[in-house]
Image (tube, rainbow, N blue to C red):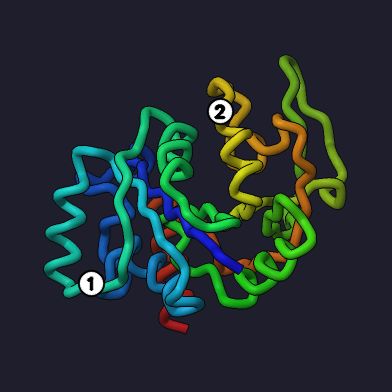
Amino acid sequence: MNLSVIITAGGIGKRFSSEVPKQFLSLMGTPVLMRTLNSFFNWNPMNEIILTLPTEWISYWEKLAKKHDFKIPHRIVDGGKERYHSIKNALDICSGDFVMIHDGVRPLVDKGTLNRCLNALKKNKAVVPYIELKDSIRELNRDNSISRDRKNYVSVQTPQCFDLKLIQKAYQGEYLDIFTDDASVAENSGMEIYLVKGNEENLKITTPIDFKIAESLIKK
């Protein structure tokens, strides 16, 4: 299967309280983003890897890569105003028949999740990994909240995986606020989303607490 991998790292760390975006911070001696690229390269070194970065941080990444003697082949694309625009830019240069789109700050995706996604792509046009909810949930209304059955909901992860031509077509539309991930863009274009089990360690590092959890998982 001819596969492209887009690693999106366009964030600038608004919720992390750090001058340096979290994707560049050292996680047990290795920058978060390098760990993420390593996860995909170690799984299959033949895949095309495309990295989206904020324009103003590209030179920082290049210096960081040189410092760590980082040799994994990848192409860099300027990130757009929203995640939507970054992904759209990256999709334009993909050469695979299928594409996996992954958050740069999810460095602990495992090979089992990647294999399940890849296998599901053989029969489905849009594949998304998920984990089940553990906490009770409530739906917020204007004046109150309503209890909901968590069995009817799941938490989705990345990589979100697609037939390249179909997701390129989905990204030709205008950006909408409802686009929280690639699956929502695909669904809006009429694509049906197929879910596969993810791995709990595949957390998105968004806050300092997430960073500590990731450190703990790596130590184990």
Quadrant of the rendered image containing residue 90: top left
User: In the drawing, does residue 199 fall left or right of residue 70?
Assistant: right
Q: Position of residue 27 (x, y in %)?
A: 32, 68
Camera-side residue of 56 and 168: 168
Name the residue located 66 percent from the left edge and 67 percent from the top edge.
Answer: 118
**Mark 1 or 2, closer to the camera:** 2
Q: Do callouts 1 and 2 mark residues in contact (Cβ within 8 Å)? A: no
Image position, residue 218 (x, y; %): 43, 77
Name the residue at 71% across, 30% down.
188
Q: Residue furthest top?
A: 142
User: Nearest the camera: 20 or 48?
Assistant: 48
Can residue 56 be seen in this snapshot? yes
What amino acid is found at the position of numbered circle 1 in the picture? Phe
**Where, by quadrant of the figure, is residue 39 drawn?**
bottom left
Which label is found at residue 172? 2
Which amino acid type corresponds to the residue marked 2 in the rendered image? Gln
Residue at point 49%, 76% (across, down)? 44
Q: Earlier in the sequence, mark 1 or mark 2?
A: 1
Percent position of residue 192, x then y? 79, 43
Q: Please report the residue visible at 55 percent of the width from the left and 20 percent of the height from the top.
A: 174
* Crowd tier of the residue under label 2, counting other residues whose Cα lies within 10 Å: few below 14, some 14–19, many 20 or above: few
Secondary structure under tag 1 reads loop
Relative side of 42 to 29, left or right: right
Quadrant housing residue 140? top right
How many marks the image carries: the answer is 2
Numbered circle sitting on residue 70: 1
| Up-down relation of residue 23 to residue 42 (above or below) | above
